[in-house]
Image: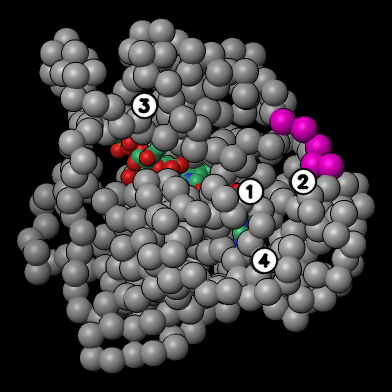
């Protein structure tokens, strides 16, 4: 176990931004993590836990300790006729876990194919796509509090999962290192085809022709058509969350824009696409200097190569300002800004 100093994080964030960590450590096992907790408190108090860096914007160097928990492993820990409990270590690549489960025909996370990042980060914002969220198949996770070094298990109800939200994105942010998660997946064929773009892509198939591999391949195709590959164009997926607005505000917007796609929540609010709001403000495909908005999905801010974190943040602020001016809606960031 070796703490490095002044380490570049350029290849550890999908915006491809240069930022340096004052201290940096990669942890390969729970044993090593426990050993780390003897490090002076002054260093541990200022920690940043980093996975694949696909939901992070560095606007400056990190003046503290960056911890990457990189232990890998996937195993079935319990199995009956209907379902399996799968345990995955936090350092696994999320899509490798999906690929493993699809190959074994364990149903439940195929709609979450190709989401970048690690297994350990998946609970942080309760990753979601195409009608499925992590919480739908989540059983529990394990990890360690950085301040006390104590181990704890969080069951689903302890995690306060919400839309792109959990206790780990709030009060436990950078205080608790997730080391593994356990999911319950099903052995019988159950698909979630509720999301309109997915339904549309699969409309020419009969139900008996559908397979888990076909659903995964379809999701991958939809995503590749819509989202930029961070290897070619730096980005962190959706920069903003889709806002939930009250009925009065919704009706005002909907009256003038009957084509608006929306989703009524159980609490009576309306979730509308931030991408639509941003596009209506003229930002889709716009480029200012090194920063721009992706031509096929206005929710995604891209780095054309030489942007700084501040340039990206300022561009995002400009989008927020214009959406607020036009629609009186203040967008929330999905991305974690450092
Ligand atoms: P990082 O960016 O490294 O970290 C994210 C947060 O998690 C940080 O606050 C970090 O401190 C914390 N964290 C990371 N690992 C741990 C750990 N082991 N313990 C405790 N805290 C930890 N997200 C979706 O939900 N749905 C999508 O469809 C989607 N599409 C995307 C498409 C693209 C092209 C990109 C670039 C991103 C997309 N994202 C999407 C966002 C991103 O993939 C997810 O948020 C992912 O879970 C981030 O994983 P990561 O390992 O890269 O986390
Ligand atoms: N839309 C526009 N213009 C745009 C983009 C979207 O008008 O530029 C409208 C269209 O009407 C479209 C609707 O928005 O029908 C929904 O678009 P899309 O299916 O692309 O989904 P999204 O709401 O923009 C969300 C997630 C994505 C996730 C997809 C699929 C958020 C913030 N984003 O995007 O997650 O992959 O749904 O489920 O919830 C991420 O979190 O990083 C991410 C990429």
Residue underneath mark 3: 275
Whether residues under marks 3 and 1 lie with C-beta atoms below 8 angstroms apart, the answer is: no
In the image, residue 209 lies at what x, y percent?
Answer: 13, 66
Which quadrant, please, contains the C terminus? top right
* Residue found at x 34% / y 83%: 84
Q: Which residues are magenta?
A: 59-63
- In percent of width and height, residue 311 lies at 67, 20
Element marked by disc 2: loop
**Closer-to-camera residue (317/301):** 317
Q: Considering the numbered disc 4 on the image, is that residue within a helix, a strand or a loop?
A: strand
The residue where tag 2 is placed is 9
Find the distance from the CA under tag 3 to the CA under tag 1: 22 Å
Of labels 4 and 3, earlier in sequence is: 4
Taking depth in this image into account, of 197 and 272 the one nearest to the observer is 272
> Is ligand 1 closer than 8 angstroms to the Cβ of mark 1?
yes
Closer to the observer: label 2 or label 4? 4
Q: Nearer the viewer, mark 1 or mark 4?
A: 4
In this rendering, position of residue 134 left or right of residue 181: left
Residue hosting label 1: 53
Give the class, few, some or many, for how many residues have Cα within 10 Å of label 2's Cα (few <14, many ≥20): many
Q: Give how far across and how far down residue 150 sits, in percent.
A: 68, 74
The disc at residue 145 is 4
Task: State the residue at coordinates (67%, 44%).
Answer: 13
């Amino acid at each position: 176990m070796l703490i490095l100093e002044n380490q570049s994080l350029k290849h550890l964030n999908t915006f491809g931004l240069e930022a340096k960590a004052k201290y940096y450590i990669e942890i390969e096992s729970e044993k090593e993590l426990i050993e780390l907790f003897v490090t002076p408190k002054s260093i541990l108090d200022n920690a940043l836990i980093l996975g694949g860096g696909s939901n992070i914007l560095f606007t400056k160097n990190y003046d503290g300790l960056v911890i990457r928990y990189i232990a890998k492993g996937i195993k079935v820990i319990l199995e009956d006729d209907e379902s399996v409990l799968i345990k995955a270590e936090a350092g696994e690549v999320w899509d490798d876990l999906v690929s493993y489960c699809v190959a074994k025909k364990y149903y439940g996370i195929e709609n979450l194919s190709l989401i970048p990042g690690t297994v350990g980060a998946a609970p942080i914002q309760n990753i979601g796509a195409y009608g499925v969220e992590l919480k739908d198949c989540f059983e529990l996770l394990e990890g360690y509090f950085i301040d006390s070094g104590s181990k704890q298990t969080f069951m689903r109800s302890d995690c306060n999962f919400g839309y792109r939200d959990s206790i780990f994105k709030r009060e436990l942010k950078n205080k608790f290192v997730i080391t593994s998660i356990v999911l319950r997946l099903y052995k019988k064929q159950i698909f979630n085809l509720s999301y309109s773009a997915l339904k549309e892509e699969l409309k020419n198939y009969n139900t008996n022709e559908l397979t888990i591999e076909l659903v995964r391949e379809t999701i991958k195709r939809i995503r590749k058509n819509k989202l930029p590959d961070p290897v070619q164009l730096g980005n962190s997926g959706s920069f903003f969350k889709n806002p939930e607005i009250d009925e009065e505000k919704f009706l005002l917007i909907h009256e003038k824009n009957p084509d608006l796609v929306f989703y009524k929540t159980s609490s009576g609010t309306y979730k509308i696409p931030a991408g639509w709001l941003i596009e209506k403000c003229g930002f889709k495909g716009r480029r200012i200097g090194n920063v721009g908005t992706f031509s096929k999905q206005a929710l995604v801010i891209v780095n054309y190569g030489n942007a700084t974190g501040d340039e990206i943040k300022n561009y995002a602020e400009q989008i927020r300002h214009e959406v607020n001016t036009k629609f009186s809606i203040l967008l929330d960031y999905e991305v974690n800004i450092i």
